[in-house]
Every structure is written in structure tokens, then in C-alpha cells.
Amino acid sequence: MNYRKLGKTGFKVSEISLGTWQVGGKWGSVFNDYNAERIINSAIDKGINFIDTADVYSDGLSETAVGRVVRSRSERIYVATKCGRQISPHVNEGYQPKVLVKYVEDSLKRTGLKTLDLIQLHCPPSEVYYRPEIFGTFEKLKEQGKILNLGVSVEKVEEALKAIEYPNVTTVQIIFNLFRQRPAELFFREAAKKNAGIIVRVPLASGLLTGLFNASTKFGKDDHRYFNREGKAFDKG
């Protein structure tokens, strides 16, 4: 496994990380703790030391499984989670400091960790990036020792560019794959100038680039890829 520094976090992380959106089973299936722990442990055994999760993945069960495994291991494993997508309706007005603080505290409880290595705003509405008080909230959480770093997971390059204007944004998670090349053209150099770490998400286009699918492949209606079955929503993770 190769490792590199993740921007100004200072973390030396594996170039391949483990995403845990559906780690507990197939899309739409009941979460399976045994399968989740087996997958996470296998990834760590192979040298992966960076695990990405979110509070909405399997209604928090993903965070719980990640925390349980990480606490049982002797290696230094970096945990990145996300918050914000629980807000319903998912609109700018729903993003309030006290709401986000509660989400962070809930993630700490689920993972059983004393501090979150990286908390990321989870694809918030574009208007949120123009609200300094939201980003200031996480600076206070860092001072309290509840988080080490703040990052963002974005849908668009323009959101990524705005996010790194905030000094306390240390990482940006962005879609980058064979179909989605705009980050390389418009964002990566700007991120490097500010030493912002880049976390690539959807690198295999939700499985489309694995060679396992063809024109006749059908996804169940409880599979998140079903909504994009016509291929018109590549801006969505």
C-alpha cells in the first residue's frame, strides 16, 4: 500500500481508502454487522488506514460498525465522517450551528471515539458555502477537542473552490472519474495552492467502470443507482 499526506491535516493516509455507504450489505438489504466488520477488518489488514463514513449511512449503523472495529485495532486508523444530510427538507435554512453541533456529538457517541479525525459537511446546498458562521461552528468544535479537522463533500467544482476559501477547511471530497474530469481541469491546482487534501469519491462511477454492468443491467428500486438509470444525473454522488 502506498501512503501520502492528506493536505494540511498532516495525516499520512493510504492512497486507497474504504467507503462504507453500503458496507453492511447490498443496497436495500438489512444491515449485517458481521459482514460490515469483516469488510472493515479486511481493508485494514491490507494496509488501508483511512475509512470514510457518514451519519446517514444505514441510519448510523455504518458509523457504529466503523467505530467498533477501529477501537479494537492497534493500528492508527483515521476516521472521516459526515453530517448534514439528516436535515429534512435538505435546504440551506436547515443548516444551523446548534443542529450541526448535535450531529457531531451524535457521531462521537455512535463511533465511541473521543475525537473525530475529520468531519465533513455532507453535500450541503450551495448557499451554505456563503455562510461563514457555519464554518466557524466547526472551529469551536475543534477548540473543544471534539474534532481535529473540517472538510466538505461537494457536488460541484464551484462549491469546492468556494469551500477552500475558508482557512479551516482542510479537505474536499469530490467526484472524479473517467466521466467527471472537471476537478482536474479547474480545481486540483487551486487545492494544491492551499494545501487542501483531496478525497476522490465515486472513482468507479458507482460501479459503472468495473465492467460488471451492461445495457441490460437492472437495479432494484431500493438501489441508489436506480434514480440515475438513464445516466442523466452524474452531478450526484
Image (cartoon, helix red, strand yellow):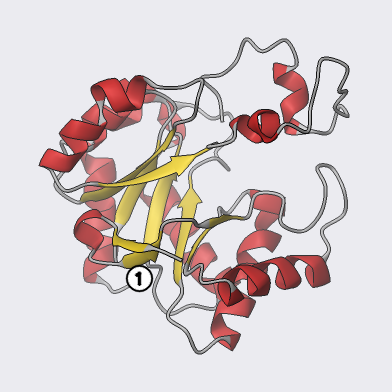
Q: Give the image quarter of residue 115.
A: bottom left
Q: Is 11 displayed left or right of 104 in the figure?
A: left
Which one is nearer the viewer's eye here, 2 or 129? Answer: 2
Residue found 28% across the figure and 55% down from its top: 138
Q: Give the x, y percent position of residue 179.
A: 51, 20
Q: Give the image quarter of residue 148.
A: bottom left
Image quadrant holding the C terminus, namely top right
Q: Give the x, y percent position of residue 36.
A: 74, 66
The 10 Å Cα crowd at callout 1, few under 14, some 14 to 19, many 20 or more, is: many
Q: Is residue 2 visible?
A: yes
Q: Is 24 displayed left or right of 131 in the figure?
A: right
Residue found 37% across the figure and 64% down from its top: 13
Q: Give the image quarter of residue 158.
A: top left
Which one is nearer the viewer's eye here, 54 or 106? Answer: 54
Identity, as a three-letter code, of the amino acid under mark 1:
Lys
Q: Is 84 displayed left or right of 10 in the figure?
A: right
Whether 64 is drawn above or below 15: the answer is below
Which one is nearer the viewer's eye here, 25 or 108? Answer: 25
Q: Give the x, y percent position of residue 126.
A: 36, 23
Which one is nearer the viewer's eye here, 218 or 131? Answer: 218
Whether 176 is drawn above or below 96: the answer is above
Residue found 72% across the figure and 31% down from its top: 211
Whether 63 is drawn above or below 100: the answer is below
Q: Is 70 displayed left or right of 208 in the figure?
A: left
Dot 1 falls on a residue whose secondary structure is loop
Q: Which residue is mark 1?
A: 146
